[in-house]
Image (tube, rainbow, N blue to C red):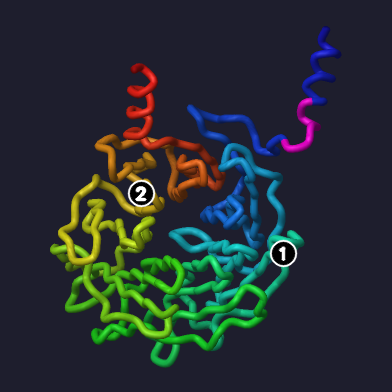
Amino acid sequence: MKPIFYLLALALLLLPGLSCTSPATGPGETLLDKGRQPQLAVDAAGVTRVVYGLDDEIFCATSTDNGLTFSEPELVGTVPDLLTGMAMGPQVASSANYTVVTAIDKKGNIHSYSLKHADGKWVKAAAVNDVPGVAAEGLMSIASDANDTFYALWLDVRNNKKNKIVLASKSGPAAAWSANRVIYESPDSTVCECCKPTIVVKDKQVNLMFRNWLQGSRDFYVTSSSDGGKTFSEPVKLGQGTWKVEGCPMDGGGLMLDESNQVHTAWQRDGHIYYAQPGKTEVEVGEGRNCRISGGEYPVIAWKDDKALKVKFLNSENIQTIGEGSYIETMEMPDKTTLCVWENDKKLYYKKISNPALTVGTEAAAAL
C-alpha cells in the first residue's frame, strides 16, 4: 500500500494548476517563499502578484484564484546592492495591460522592470530618477490607473541634499519615465527623512501622502491632483493632534481610495495607530507601528504590535491577529476577501481573511 500511496501523492503534486507553495505552517497561513518586504498588486483581469526581494534579486509570485494559491516565483531582475527592510524594497503596480516593478540600490538609483501581460515576459526598463543617486533613503511607492499610466513617488535629495517629494510617470508601452518633478519641499528644509511616502491613483485623481517636518512636528500631509498629476492642491495636515519628536519615526502610513473616490488614511503617532480622512478628526485604532490601509468596498487597516500582526476592518469592531512578523501588506481580492502577506524572519507567509461584519451577516441570513 505504501508505494501506491506515494505514487498517488506524486501524481497529485504534478497535476497542472496546483500551487507550488509550501503547506500551511499555522492557522490558515501558508509559506510563500524566502524573501523580504512583500508588495501586492491586482490587475484588471483579477491576477494577483506578490513582489519581493531576496538578497540582490527580485521575485514575483502570481495567483489566478484570488490569492488562494500562488505559482512558483519567477525572477524579475537582479539589482546589485538592492535595498530592503524598513519599508524599502521592490514596489509593484498593475494596470490593464502591464505590471511595473521598481527597486532602489544603495547608490540611490531607482531601477524599473515592466511586464506586458500579453506575453508574460519581464524586461528591464529605464531608470526612474533623472539625476543619479538622489533616492538615497530608498523609500518610494508606485501606482497606476486603469489605462496603463504609472506613477512613481519617492524621497529625493536633489539640488540641496534635503529630502523632498518627487514624482515621475510613464505610459505602459513607453520605455522612459517622464522628467522628475518636485511636488513638495518643506519650508523647514526637509520632509521626514525615513518615512515612506504613499501614492494611490484612480482615473485622473492622483493622491499623495507623506510625513512632513514643520516646526519640529512630524505629521502626515495629503495632496491631490484631479488632472493626472499635472497640478496638486496645497498639502493638508491629517488629524487634529501633532507629534513633536526629535529624530525620524521611520514609519510611513497607508493611503487608499474607496469605490466613491473618498480618501482614507492610516498612520502612527507616538506609538498609536490612527485612522483619518482629510479634514476630519483622527480615530485611534490601536497601539503599534508600520500600519497600512487597503480595500475598496471594505477598507482594512493592518499594523504591527510588537511581534503580533493585526488587522481591523473599518466596519467592524473586531481586531484580528493574523500572525507574527515584522512587516505586513494587505489587499482586497476580486472575490471581496482580503489577502494578507507578511514577512517573518526573512520568510514570507500569506493568508486570506473575510470581513467579520460580512461573515456574521451571511451566517445570520443562512440561519433564517
Of circles 2 and 1, the one toward us is 2
Instruction: Report x, y in % for residue 324.
Output: 43, 38
Q: Is residue 294 above or below residue 174?
A: above
Q: Which stretch appears magenta? A: 12-17
Residue 149 is at least partly visible in this image: yes
How crowded pointer 2 is (Cα within 10 Å; few <14, some 14-19, many 20+) is rated as many
The CA span between labels 2 and 1 is 31 Å
What residue lies at 58% left-to-right and 70% top-to-bottom? 148
Where does label 2 land, which residue?
299
Left or right for 188, reference 2: left
From the viewer's perspective, is 31 left or right of 18?
A: left
> Which amino acid type corresponds to the residue marked 2 in the rendered image?
Pro
Proximity of marks 2 and 1: CB atoms separated by less than 8 Å: no
Where's residue 71, x and y in %?
Answer: 69, 44
- Tell me the amino acid under the disc marked 1: Trp
Q: Residue at x 49, y 86 (%)?
A: 180
- Please tell me in which quadrant of the rendered image residue 320 appears: top left
Residue 16 on the magenta segment: yes
61 vs 320: above or below: below
Vertical position of residue 6 compared to residue 298: above or below: above
- Relative image position of residue 176 (x, y in whole percent): 63, 82
The residue carrying mark 1 is 122
Up-down: is 285 above or below 243?
above
Q: Is residue 42 magenta?
A: no
Q: Residue at x 33, y 29 (%)?
A: 361
**Quadrant location of the N terminus in the rendered image:** top right
Question: Helix, strand or loop at disc 2?
Answer: loop
Q: Nearer the viewer, residue 86 or 209?
A: 209
224 left or right, relative to 131: left
- The residue shown at (57%, 64%) is 95
